Image: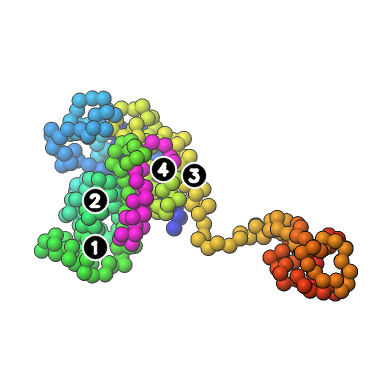
């Protein structure tokens, strides 16, 4: 069960099932066992996604060690609508949220109408696909917008399109300029803040640390006054944990059953033990972040009595003597007058005798 206001952790199975439904079910089980809130897949029709001769990305060629086209690679990684429906039903039965990224309008409609997906993730590659962004916005469901490869102005344009549709309920506009003028000249509707989370992302697999620029995640949130998060493609768990400490509300991370398996994303993914470590570490960081109010915790109050000091007589003091720095000292425990108030006592005449070491109470 997803806890309100808790960091949303998405275990990205993606295409690490290698087109095998039984492997996809295993990935769901692992995500659930590791404590992730959501397990995410990708729903696409290769013929609608990529041209027949489109080349592989550099990282894909490196990870696959094969001379394939994108079309050939993706065709081997497809799952059918019915298989995704099976996965969704299984997720519901074991208590983990199913999420899939759509790469065309038919897939989007299937995820909305047939699976009744609760939220939608717009991948980085679709951030410049204006009408597709608009059709996501028409669903009026929570949107997670990944911003890998994008400039701030491209992110602004994507948000402007989503805002326009949320405000007007209309897929069509006179022009992009019209949409942008509407965006910059009007207040952002409250539903945008409620529905949209921006994900910072470095679209390399794995992403070198010097390309991450994690601080820009906060720039995204501040620029648009929206919740922000991080889609992590680095090796290991450290950067995802750091993102949690910097205020990420969503963290997404690829995982696999076997890092050495053949496929485009396995090498940049966590194994099950690493995923479990990441989830537990994020929860610990989240718990430790706590409140922004600086005050002692309830458990510290007893400790303060033992760790702090009280003003005591440094020597025997007779009634009528004058208190000074020579006849007062500070010593544990802190059950008497705090040494902070020593200046209030200096020059006072004591009303009774004190033995050395006795707490002063004047």
Q: Earlier in the sequence, mark 2 or mark 3?
A: 2
Residue 69 visible in this rendered orientation of the protein: yes
Q: Nearer the viewer, residue 65 or 134?
A: 65
Name the side, left or right, on which 316 lies relative to 294.
right
Residue at 27%, 28% (x, y): give it: 62
Name the side, left or right, on which 50 lies relative to 299.
left
Viewer-nearest of labels 4 and 1? 4
- Asked if the stretch drawn in magenta spans residue 219, the answer is yes
Q: Which residues are magenta?
A: 212-238
- Asked if the stretch drawn in magenta spans residue 340, the answer is no
| Residue with the mark numbered 3 | 281
**41 lies above or below 186:** above
| Residue with the mark numbered 2 | 151
Viewer-nearest of labels 2 and 1? 2
Local packing at callout 4 (Cα closer than 10 Å; few below 14, some 14-19, many 20+) is some
**How far is the residue under mark 2 from the one under mark 3?**
31 Å
**80 lies above or below 191:** above
Residue 84 image offset from top left, x and y in percent: 29, 42
Disc 1 to disc 3: CB gap under 8 Å: no
Viewer-nearest of labels 4 and 3? 4
Residue 109 image offset from top left, x and y in percent: 22, 51
Looking at the rendering, which quadrant does residue 332 occupy? bottom right
Disc 2 to disc 4: CB gap under 8 Å: no
Residue 87 image offset from top left, x and y in percent: 34, 42
SS category of the residue bearing label 1: helix
Residue at 17%, 33% (x, y): give it: 55
Name the side, left or right, on which 168 lies relative to 262.
left
Tag shown at residue 239:
4
SS category of the residue bearing label 4: helix
């Amino acid at each position: 069960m997803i806890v309100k206001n808790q960091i949303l952790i998405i275990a990205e199975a993606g295409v690490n099932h290698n087109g095998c439904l039984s492997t996809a079910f295993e990935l769901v089980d692992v995500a659930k066992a590791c404590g992730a809130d959501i397990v995410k897949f990708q729903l696409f029709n290769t013929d609608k996604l990529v041209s027949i001769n489109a080349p592989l990305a550099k990282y894909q060629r490196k990870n696959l060690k094969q001379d394939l086209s994108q079309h050939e690679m993706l065709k081997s990684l497809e799952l059918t609508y019915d298989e995704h429906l099976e996965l969704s039903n299984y997720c519901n039965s074991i208590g983990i949220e199913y999420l899939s990224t759509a790469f065309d309008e038919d897939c989007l409609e299937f995820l909305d109408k047939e699976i009744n997906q609760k939220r939608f993730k717009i991948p980085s590659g679709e951030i410049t696909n204006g009408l597709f962004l608009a059709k996501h916005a028409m669903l009026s469901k929570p949107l997670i917008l990944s911003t890998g490869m994008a400039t701030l102005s491209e992110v602004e344009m994507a948000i402007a399109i989503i805002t326009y549709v949320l405000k007007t309920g209309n897929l069509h506009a006179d022009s992009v300029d019209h949409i942008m003028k509407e965006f910059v000249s009007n207040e952002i509707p409250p539903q945008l803040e409620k529905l949209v989370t921006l994900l910072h992302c470095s679209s390399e697999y794995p992403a070198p640390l010097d390309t991450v620029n994690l601080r820009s995640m906060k720039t995204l949130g501040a620029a648009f006054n929206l919740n922000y998060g991080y889609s992590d493609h680095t090796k290991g768990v450290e950067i995802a944990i750091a993102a949690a400490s910097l205020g990420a509300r969503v963290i997404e991370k690829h995982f696999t059953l076997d890092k050495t398996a053949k496929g485009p994303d396995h090498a940049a993914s966590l194994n099950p033990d690493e995923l479990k470590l990441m989830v537990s570490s994020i929860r610990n960081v989240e718990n430790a972040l706590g409140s922004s109010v600086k005050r002692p915790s309830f458990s510290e109050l007893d400790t303060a009595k033992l760790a702090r000091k009280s003003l005591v007589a440094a020597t025997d003091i007779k009634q009528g003597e004058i208190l000074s720095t020579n006849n007062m000292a500070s010593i544990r425990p802190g059950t008497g007058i705090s040494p902070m108030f020593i200046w209030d006592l200096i020059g006072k005449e004591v009303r009774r005798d004190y033995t050395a070491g006795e707490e002063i109470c004047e």
